[in-house]
Image (spheres, rainbow, N blue to C red):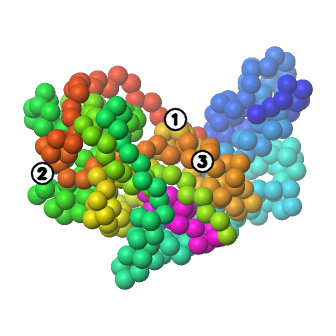
């Protein structure tokens, strides 16, 4: 973040807001000597680039507002604007300091509307009469991937009645299907992931639960539709992008399930054994700001960021039917899973904008 010859201009003690102080301690570096701004010696110090990173993390990421689909920050700052946001009394001096050090002003950000879901394919997916055409496009434009017998993945069960019985790790019976992201009524889906941490998150495990994990492999090559990939599209804007529409869809909450189930249903009818899709918890797992943009352009559409954006998606698996009972998936091993420590990482933002 800072080059070695950058001068340090502030320290964590320069700020009054508790969130900014704690974030500054996380971002700052331990450097001997007095802070050139406040004179304190025992706090982590920040160069100009560090103050910029702190301001971005606190005011931009920290004011992120989630829409039904997508999300956008409510505050931005740059060197062309005077500060025009309302500032809480405990933040007034801090804002003045950042304005002076960076030569910037803070203002309300009017997001480009695609950032909050104004994307044609996404709007059509939400309209039952238009949905099928987009679902058909998803089936034809996303790639097929094979799940091979040497690739293992995990399935976590909370409080199973017979933890050592492999059948307990199959999908639920058909009668209880219809509640998840991919299972329509009557069609169970086995949910798993090669990422064990994601499995644990997805099951919303708590300390009182008895948790077990099965290591699973397929017994033959399974055909999966992979909607976790970054679809490279040419000559379309963010407002028309199927890639961003699908990305936002799988990072949305329960209100999106009707649509994701329709995609799963279509994939099943087309002969696929299941779906690979980005985990809702990908963003938390990696600790990145969701839906990153530069000058209002999605990083998913900037070639030099695309590999990185792709790497952020942690894949989940949904396999149709009851693959353990059907013999398509076998249980290699079952373990008890002991939660020994749960950590939260957080940073701060202002209260309102
Ligand atoms: Zn200081």
Label 1 C-beta lies within 8 Å of the nearest ligand 1 atom? no
Front-lying residue, 216 or 125: 216
Mark found first going from the N terminus, 3 or 1:
3
Q: Are marks 3 and 1 in contact (CB under 8 Å)?
A: no
**Residue underneath mark 1:** 345
Bounds of the magenta span?
Answer: 236-250
User: In the displayed structure, would residue 7 be above or below residue 346?
Assistant: above
**Residue underneath mark 2:** 173
Q: Choose top left, top right, bottom left or bottom right for residue 336.
A: top left
**Residue underneath mark 3:** 309
Q: Position of residue 317 (x, y in %)?
A: 35, 46
Q: Choose top left, top right, bottom left or bottom right for residue 39.
A: top right
- The crowd level at tag 2 (other Cα within 10 Å; few <14, some 14-19, many 20+) is few
Q: Position of residue 194 (x, y in %)?
A: 38, 36
Q: Of all residues shown, which one is farthest toward the top?
A: 32
Does 184 sit left or right of 236 as displayed? left
Determine whether the residue tagged by mark 1 lies in a helix, strand or loop.
loop
Residue at horizontal 66%, vertical 54%? 299
Front-lying residue, 239 or 152: 152
């Amino acid at each position: 973040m800072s080059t070695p010859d950058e001068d340090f201009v502030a320290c964590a003690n320069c700020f009054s807001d508790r969130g900014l102080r704690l974030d500054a301690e996380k971002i700052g570096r331990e450097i001997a000597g007095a802070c050139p701004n406040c004179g304190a010696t025992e706090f982590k110090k920040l160069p100009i680039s560090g103050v910029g990173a702190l301001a971005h993390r606190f005011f931009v990421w920290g004011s992120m507002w989630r829409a039904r689909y997508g999300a956008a920050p409510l505050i931005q700052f740059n060197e062309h604007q005077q500060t025009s946001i309302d500032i809480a009394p405990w933040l007034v001096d801090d804002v003045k300091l950042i304005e002076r050090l960076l030569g910037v002003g803070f203002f309300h950000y009017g997001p480009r509307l695609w950032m909050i879901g104004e994307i044609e394919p996404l709007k059509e997916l939400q309209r039952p009469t238009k949905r099928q055409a987009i679902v058909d496009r998803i089936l034809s434009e996303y790639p097929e991937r094979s799940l091979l017998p040497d690739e293992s993945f995990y399935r976590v069960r909370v409080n199973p009645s017979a933890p050592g019985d492999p059948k307990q790790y199959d999908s639920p019976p058909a009668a209880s299907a219809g509640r998840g992201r991919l299972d329509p009524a009557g069609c169970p889906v086995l949910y798993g992931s090669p990422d064990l941490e994601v499995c644990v998150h997805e099951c919303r495990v708590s300390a009182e639960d008895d948790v077990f994990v099965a290591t699973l492999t397929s017994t033959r090559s399974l055909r999966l539709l992979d909607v976790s990939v970054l679809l490279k599209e040419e000559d379309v804007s963010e407002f028309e992008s199927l890639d961003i529409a699908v990305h936002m869809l799988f990072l949305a909450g329960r209100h999106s399930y009707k649509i994701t189930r329709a995609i799963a249903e279509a994939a099943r009818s087309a002969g696929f054994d299941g779906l690979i899709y980005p985990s809702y918890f990908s963003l938390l797992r990696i600790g990145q700001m969701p839906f990153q943009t530069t000058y209002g352009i999605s990083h998913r559409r900037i070639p030099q960021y695309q590999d990185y954006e792709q790497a952020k998606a942690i894949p989940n698996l949904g396999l149709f039917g009851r693959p353990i009972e059907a013999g398509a998936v076998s249980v290699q091993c079952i373990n008890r899973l002991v939660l020994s420590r749960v950590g939260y990482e957080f940073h701060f933002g202002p209260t309102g904008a």
